[in-house]
Amino acid sequence: MTILISKDTRFIVQGITGREAVNLTRENLDYGAVIVGGVTPGRAGRDIYGVPVYDSVRDIVAKHGRVEGSIISVPPGFTRDAAFEALENGVRLIVIVTENIPRKEVAQMVELAALRGARIIGPNCLGIISPGEAKMGGVGGPAANTRQAYSKGPIGVMSRSGGMTTEIASTLTAAGLGQSTCVSIGGDAIVGTTYAELMPLYEADPETQAIAIYSEPGGRMEAELAEWVVQNRSRLPIVAFMAGRFMDEMKGMRFGHAGTIVEGVEDTTAEKIARMEAAGISVAERIEEIPTLIRRRLAQNGGR
Amino acid sequence: MRFYEYESKALFAMRGLPLAKSRVAINAGEARAAAIAIGGSVVLKSQVLSGGRMKAGAVKFADTPDQAAAHFDAILPILVNGQRARSVLVEEKSPIAQEYFVSVTWDGRAKKPVVLFSDMGGIDIEEVALKHPEHVSKTHFSTILPLSPRIAKEAVGAVGVSGNDLNRLTPIVFELIQLFLDYDLTLAEINPLARLEDGRFIVLDGHVDLEAEARGKHAALLAELGIGDDETRQARPPTAFEIAGRKVNEADHRGVAGNVVEFDGNLGLVIGAGGGSLTLFDAVRKHGGRPANYCEIGGNPSVKKACLLTKLILAKPGVEKIAVMMNVVSNTRVDIVARGVIKGCIESGKDPAQVISIFRIPGAWEDEGFQILAKYGVEYCDRSVSMYDAAGRAVAKLGAQV
């Protein structure tokens, strides 16, 4: 089993004629994705690697029936409109690749998604991959590169960094630990889906046996995860890697992603590490320690 | 990006929020003139992008124009949390009966904006929330429903404020909520919001933070307030090196080669991407290395941008070698970065084999990239060498040279 997506997930690409979207479409098709159509207003009738282009999501739905997911890759000024369009046409899983979207617009998209019972991954993310099954987004890049880094297996990966999603998967793969589903959740201060919000999905997935996460300074997402793990007595051992430790002494300076800034004590890596460790989450100092820590935790769990 | 108090108040004034009379002074003469124009007792406040002014002695009261001039000279040189004052705000002294606190900000967990209100203003709100939680209200509100004043009324009423005070505070808080959303702020804070002895309310101190992503959208406001493009308004002003780094990134629209932050070490870092840079910077420090800079390569930057970034870093005084490192890349092309970095070394008059301590960028087009590096005799490694170990090799090379 996988979470969020499967081999059969029918999705679309909004902004499909853009340079990055064209690459992403090809990469996803090469990995076996079912892309039923793409949207670029005024470009109806064209095709991108065989995917028909339409003026609107409504036109795709009229022609091809219900669409489950959408990748949005449009400029920041058009993203909210694209997300609203997808949501109001019945799309329930939206991956937003676009970065530099002001928080207000992110909050608006997330709020409407919640009202519609839909889920947003991102913004500022590379999407979702269930190795050997399906991919939705730019994560891993071209299919050949994706196959080299990602392999099927029992580890769920969640990451605030798209690139580090692949670095961690590649490290796990090299150590003989495959991945169930990896989610690049996005690097902004507000994201559609947090670690804690994905946990119930991993809990319910019999294939997932452990979780690896990549985290950074800024925000309350790690504290939220720590609380969730304790409150729900999670069956899944979690190993976290914390980057940006140097930022603890650099209050008010933004590094890396839009959401990566130390403004208060709770934003620091020291505080986050303390909270996660108190909740039983193992924190790795280096990426290459992740496989060893996961194996140790799995052994302690009696190899469940 | 944070606004100074006087800029925040200019924005508040545009929206009709009640303020005391004030003037900005950049020398003692102007402070004296301001005190005369305002008349009566005044307060002088250092204009810095930091809290803690009172504690630092950078806020003083003056009863006469001469005293105001003297206080100006005393306040201006004071560093508040390492921040230099830009100017001094001279403001009418107000007879205060009670102080309140109100701020509007984003709650990343609720994914909604939230109003924080307290009837114990003037002091650190986090402390109040800890010791007197019943005196702080938190009211989340929708970003898609039409805004309505009841949000403000509920925020104020939740700490027990009623009667005339409730009806006078509600429109002020509601205005702050609207201003927060209209200008894409990440923080709009008034502390203290004071009730005067005659029952009126005024904004005594406050500041706002504008979201960096929304800068372009609010260019007209920034121009009106006189905030320049080079002002990043982070914890410290940008250095010349950092401004030059931004120009590199603006060389063309392809990919990112920027976000340069200056440090004072000897190892130049050409690193990426967002998360990879944070990881690598930590790794270099953990090995005892001294980074000369932080930076980020992301997306698929052109050869030109990678070259310009390399030249900028190599030209920085004290830089002995550079390390070129990223996480496993999928969109960035290894060969293009390799070409750009080697070009940058050569154009700086350096031998790439000598000056590049390690090249660790595995991923898309790596075979082509490694071929180029081999041709120039540059030490490189693939993903079998961890980011941590690659950083270690770079640091070790510098150690051997010294």
Image (cartoon, coloured by chain):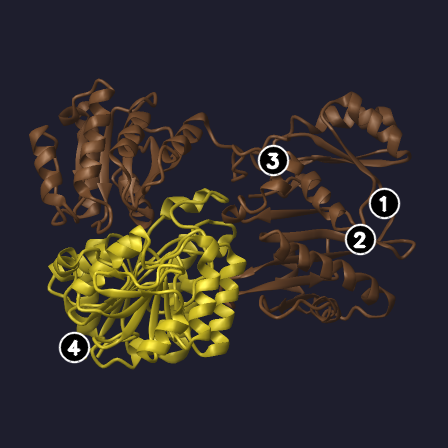
Q: Are marks 4 and 1 on the same chain?
A: no
Q: Which residue is mark 1?
A: B94
Q: Which chain is yellow?
A: A
Q: Nearer the viewer, mark 2 or mark 3?
A: 3
Residue A241 position within the rendered picture, expressed as x and y whole percent measured from the top left: 30, 57
Picture layout, residue B250 above or below residue B144: above
What is the three-letter code of the residue carrying label 4?
Gly
Whether tag 4 and tag 2 are in contact, CB under 8 A, the answer is no
Q: Which residue is mark 3?
A: B227
At mark 4, the secondary structure is loop
Q: Which residue is mark 4?
A: A303
Q: Nearer the viewer, mark 4 or mark 1?
A: 1
Q: What residue appears at the point 39 percent right and 70 percent down from the top-left corner?
A: A57
What is the three-letter code of the residue carrying label 1?
Ser
At mark 2, the secondary structure is strand
Q: Which residue is mark 2?
A: B194
Residue B261 position within the rendered picture, expressed as x and y whole percent measured from the top left: 40, 35
Task: Give the mark nearest the N terminus, 2 or 3.
Answer: 2
Chain bearing mark 4: A
Pick whichever, A35 or B109, lies toward us: A35
Whole-number angstrom distance, CA of label 4 to CA of label 2: 62 Å
Whole-number angstrom distance, CA of label 4 to CA of label 3: 60 Å
Whole-number angstrom distance, CA of label 1 to CA of label 2: 9 Å
Q: Are marks 4 and 2 on the same chain?
A: no
Residue B289 shows which numbered tag? none
Whether tag 4 and tag 3 are in contact, CB under 8 A, the answer is no
Q: Nearer the viewer, mark 1 or mark 3?
A: 3
- The crowding category of the residue bearing disc 3, from other C-alpha atoms within 10 Å (few below 14, some 14 to 19, many at least 20), is some
Q: What residue appears at the point 11 percent right and 49 percent down from the top-left corner?
A: B384
At mark 1, the secondary structure is loop
Task: Indicate the colour of chain B.
Answer: brown
Is any atom of residue B123 visible in this view? no
